[in-house]
Structures are given as C-alpha cells and as structure tokens.
C-alpha cells in the first residue's frame, strides 16, 4: 500500500524519513498543535508552496528547464477563483468554473510557450518566459474591469469554508471548529493528493525519460525520444499543478491581486526553496517549503527577542534589529547552500548511502 502511494520512491534515509513524517504530522495537526491565526496561516502557506515548488521542481529539477513564467500560471489559478466567484457568487459551481477555466487557459499558454520556445537554447527560453511573465503581470494590472487592477479582487467563498460558519458551539481541544478549519483541511488533502500525483509522474517511465533528457538531451534524442514533445509535456504538467496551487492560495486568502500571486519575488522564493530542499526531489520541495516559510514568517519575531535581550550591547542589538530580517534570511540561505550543496534531501541521502551497513 505504502509502496503504491509513494510510487516506490522511498526517502532512502532514516533521518529523512523521520523529518518527512514529522512534517506530515505537523501539518496534519497544525491547527491543534499550534493554535492561533498566524500559525494556521503559516501552515496553509506551507501547503500551498509545497505544491507550487514541487510543480516547479518537475520542470527544473527533473527536466532541466529554467522557466521564470511559473508564477504566471500560479496567478492564473488564483485569478480563476477570484474572477469566477466575483461574477457568479460564492458557490461551489463558481469554484469549479474558476478552476476549470484557469486550467484550460494554463494548458493553452503553456502549450504555446513550450512549442514555440523550447526549441531554443536554455538561456533564451528563460528570457522568453521572463518576458511573457512580465507581460502577463502588466496585463493583469491593466485589465481592471476583470482583475480589479492593482487593487485586486476580494471575494467570498462558499459558506461552509468561511470563518463565520460554526457548526459546533463548543471548541475541540481548544480550537473552534469553523469554516476556516475546514478550508485548511481542504488545502491539506488537496496538497497531499497533488504531491502523490507528482511522485507518480516523476517515478513513471515518462519521468525517467525526463531525467534522461536532463542529463543528456542529445543521447535521449539519438535513442528515439522526441525531446521537444517530452519537454513540452513536462512544461504543461508543471503549469497545471502551479495553477492548482494558485487556486489553493485564492481559496485561503479570499483575495487576489498582482503582487499576491504574480510577483517576481514569489518566483525567487520558489528557486530558493528548490535549492534548499534539493533539486530533482519532490520530498525536497516539502522540506524546503517548511524551512523557508517558517523562517520567513518567524525570523522577525526571533530577531525582536534577540534585539531586546541584547539591549545593553549596542552593536549586537543593532545587528539583531527586526528590520534586518532579510539580511539574516540571506545569511541562512548562504549557509544552507554551503553546507547542503545538493539540498537537505540530497545531503541526507548521500550520508545514508555512505554509512556502513
């Protein structure tokens, strides 16, 4: 059963297995282990980024394609939900139409970008996707009648997913059982299903061909594989999963705007998370997302405590100022790359492989 769920892709490291189980259980019981609005929002953001980064890793880590248009598809998913619910009301049919329309648009755009651009060299493809993403972000900002422009769109979700929905008056284990909690578990189940689907894809014969193309595309072409077809298919699949991640974001925030889902900062976050977790590993996406999002969310709070504790040491206190959290986040990233050049997953698997039996 477990072998089929994981598609035969076991952690191959006891330490990694323990970490993955801890991450899974932590996210599964996050509302009860870490009560509070901020903690729940951080856990939901982790779930969204796990799917987004895993879909990007399918493109970068498994196929060897560098694309800067990934957040465009992320934004399409978010806007699909936002526009549909704004026009049709907070109904399940509106959500279905929004997701379906966003997936169709992402399919057509990714197919067009893949077929017309993947024949060029890697650096030129990266530049083309960067230009396409920038153009789409500008377009989303200008079409204010549809997208809300720079202000974005605020919308309502079905009542069962709204915070006002409280089927039980008494809290359970100190946590109110409301629509917000149901929405979180909807995201959790969706994220688990999508990650398992990605595991199935990368461990299938199709996934093996993608890895062969990544290692040597000329050899893959020579033995009969149509590289452009496989790369385009990978690009389309990656875009569709990113679109679903965007829909998850919109469903949780009940708002979407250009800076929320289309900003280049999100693209850079995806790159950082892939490098931290380990390229070419779906598990690395989960671990990297947890480390990055938690550090990004709580680093300022930790620095504030350090700043107050070292008030008597002006130089140290100045360095630990909460305003310098980006500096320390950069330092943590440099250290992670230095000590984990193949990512956390790669390092743990290599250590397990060299450990004597």
Image (spheres, helix red, strand yellow):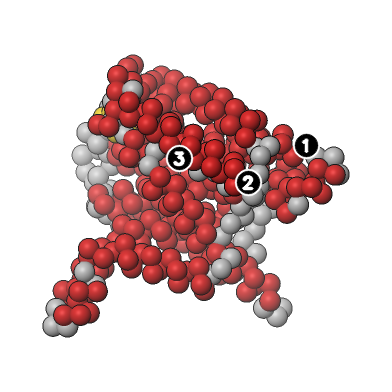
Q: Is residue 296 above or below residue 161?
A: below
- In front here: 45 or 8? 45
One can see residue 192 in this view: no
Q: Is residue 95 left or right of residue 299?
A: right
Secondary structure under tag 2 reads helix
The quadrant where residue 353 appears: bottom right
**Mark 1 or mark 2: which is in front?**
2
Secondary structure under tag 3 reads helix
Residue on which the image places disc 2: 122
Q: Is residue 305 above or below residue 200?
A: below
Check if mark 1's residue and mark 3's residue have beta carbons within 8 Å: no
**Mark 3 or mark 2: which is in front?**
2
Q: Is residue 321 above or below residue 219?
A: below
Q: Is residue 261 left or right of residue 194?
A: left
Q: Which mark is residue 302?
A: none
Residue on which the image places disc 3: 71
Residue on which the image places disc 1: 226
The quadrant where residue 116 appears: top right
- The tally of labels here is 3
């Amino acid at each position: 059963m477990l072998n089929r769920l994981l598609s035969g892709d076991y952690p191959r490291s006891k330490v990694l297995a323990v970490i993955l189980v801890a991450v899974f259980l932590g996210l599964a019981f996050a509302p009860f282990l870490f009560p509070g609005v901020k903690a729940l929002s951080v856990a939901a953001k982790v779930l969204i980024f796990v799917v987004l980064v895993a879909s990007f890793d399918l493109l970068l880590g498994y196929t060897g394609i560098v694309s800067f248009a990934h957040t465009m598809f992320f934004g399409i998913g978010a806007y699909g939900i936002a526009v549909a619910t704004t026009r049709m009301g907070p109904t399940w049919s509106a959500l279905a139409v929004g997701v379906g329309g966003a997936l169709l648009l992402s399919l057509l755009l990714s197919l067009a970008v893949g077929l017309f651009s993947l024949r060029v060299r890697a650096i030129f493809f990266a530049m083309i996707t960067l230009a396409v993403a920038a153009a789409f972000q500008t377009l989303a900002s200008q079409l204010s009648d549809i997208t809300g422009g720079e202000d974005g769109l605020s919308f309502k979700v079905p009542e069962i997913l709204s915070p006002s929905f409280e089927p039980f008056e008494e809290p359970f284990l100190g946590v109110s059982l409301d629509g917000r909690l149901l929405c979180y578990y909807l995201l959790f189940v969706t994220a688990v299903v999508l990650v398992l689907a990605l595991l199935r894809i990368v461990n299938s014969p199709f996934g093996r061909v993608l890895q062969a193309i990544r290692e040597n595309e000329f050899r893959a072409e020579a033995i009969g594989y149509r590289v452009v077809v496989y790369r385009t298919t990978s690009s389309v699949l990656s875009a569709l999963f990113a679109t679903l991640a965007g829909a998850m974001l919109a469903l949780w925030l009940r708002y979407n705007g250009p800076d929320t889902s289309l900003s280049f900062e999100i693209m850079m976050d995806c790159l950082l998370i892939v490098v931290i977790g380990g390229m070419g590993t779906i598990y690395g996406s989960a671990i990297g997302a947890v480390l990055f999002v938690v550090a990004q969310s709580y680093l300022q709070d930790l620095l504030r405590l350090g700043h107050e504790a070292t008030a008597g040491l002006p130089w140290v206190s100045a360095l630990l100022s909460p305003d310098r959290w980006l500096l320390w986040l950069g330092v943590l990233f440099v250290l992670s790359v230095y000590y984990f050049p193949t990512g956390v997953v790669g390092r743990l698997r290599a250590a397990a492989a060299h450990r004597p039996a």
